[in-house]
Amino acid sequence: MDDITPAPESLHKLLEEAKPELLKFKLSKDDARRNVGRERVVELTEITLTSWAPLRDSLDQLFLPAPAEQHKAELARLDTRAWVFYAADLAAEDVNSDVAKKAAAKLAEKVKAHDRKLMTWAIAVFGDDPIHAATLRDISRGSGKRDDAEDVQRLVALYSENWALAEQKQTEISKAYLDEADADAAKQLDYLRSRKRNAARRLAEAAYALWYRDYAELIELGRYLTRAEPDSLQRFPGVQEERGAPSTASSASEEELEDEVDEEGDEAEQPPELEQSE
């Protein structure tokens, strides 16, 4: 298939009409996480509906009324659900673009560098004070993007509250640098929070799950009905058999999992000067 069906001109309207259902939909751990892009979802839908065309009239003969009507409904709405996912995925793309990811990664490295620099000089300036040393030991626990940002904010507060001492004992950390580090940390925390609140991405995941539920059901049934035919698998291609299919945007759940792994996967580095038995 060289070309996919042109996207409807009213994608925005289509998505708006589907929003009530998408907002009510609750993703479960059993719902599939997509491994194909939105264009491929439309292609797979077109292939499947074409393959189902000669089989549709046999549903009433093969099934009782209730399941027959269920499968008819799945066929009737599959194309719409594919395009709803297309529209939802497109709407959520900006915040998950490669440019946004690169900017976030660059910010994360910058915040991590702030954390290391502020901690190194804090040990030299405040480490002799038992109260400050205990605070630094507490700050040094943990790892990950969120922890880095929170550490920076706590270290900035420590410097600011004891600026006379900090200014007296070192010249590397300035008030301007503290302002810069604090702003970068706040920006990183806002980014992490906004990703988890990304309503557009959650709508896209819901739209995909709804499409996949119908698609998987129709694929399984279509393969069963054509099991004696040699091209059954080609006529009813399964999503899980896709290999190397491009994904236009990573799902929010995957990105959040990456954050959780990053935040919890590395052991915190304890500054040697602060390692004490309590």
Image (tube, rainbow, N blue to C red):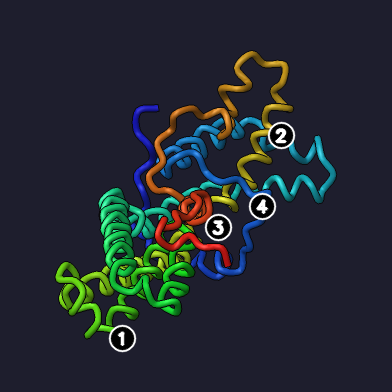
What residue does disc 3 label?
A: 206
- Using the rendered view, name the quadrant where residue 270 is placed: bottom left
Vertical position of residue 69 compared to residue 4: above or below: below
- Classify residue 150 as left or right of residue 214: left
How far, Cα to Cα, is label 3 from label 1?
47 Å
The kind of residue on which mark 4 rests is Lys
The total number of labels drawn is 4
The kind of residue on which mark 1 rests is Glu
> Which tag, 4 or 3, sits closer to the chain's start?
4
> Which tag, 3 or 1, sits closer to the chain's start?
1
Circle 2 — which element? helix
Q: Which mark is residue 161?
A: 1
**Which residue is located at x 52 percent, y 47 percent?**
79
> Which tag, 1 or 4, sits closer to the chain's start?
4
How far, Cα to Cα, is label 1 from label 4?
46 Å
Q: Which mark is residue 136?
A: none
What residue does disc 4 label?
A: 29
- C-beta proximity under 8 Å, tags 2 and 1: no
> Which tag, 2 or 1, sits closer to the chain's start?
1
Circle 3 — which element? helix
**Which residue is located at x 36 percent, y 48 percent?**
7
> Which tag, 2 or 4, sits closer to the chain's start?
4
Q: Position of residue 15 (x, y in %)?
A: 44, 62
Between residue 258 and residue 53, name the one nearer to us. Answer: 258
Mark nearer the viewer, 2 or 1: 1
Circle 4 — which element? loop
How far, Cα to Cα, is label 3 from label 2?
23 Å
Mark nearer the viewer, 2 or 4: 4
- Using the rendered view, name the quadrant where residue 71 is placed: top right
> Which tag, 3 or 2, sits closer to the chain's start?
3
Q: Position of residue 195 (x, y in %)?
A: 42, 63
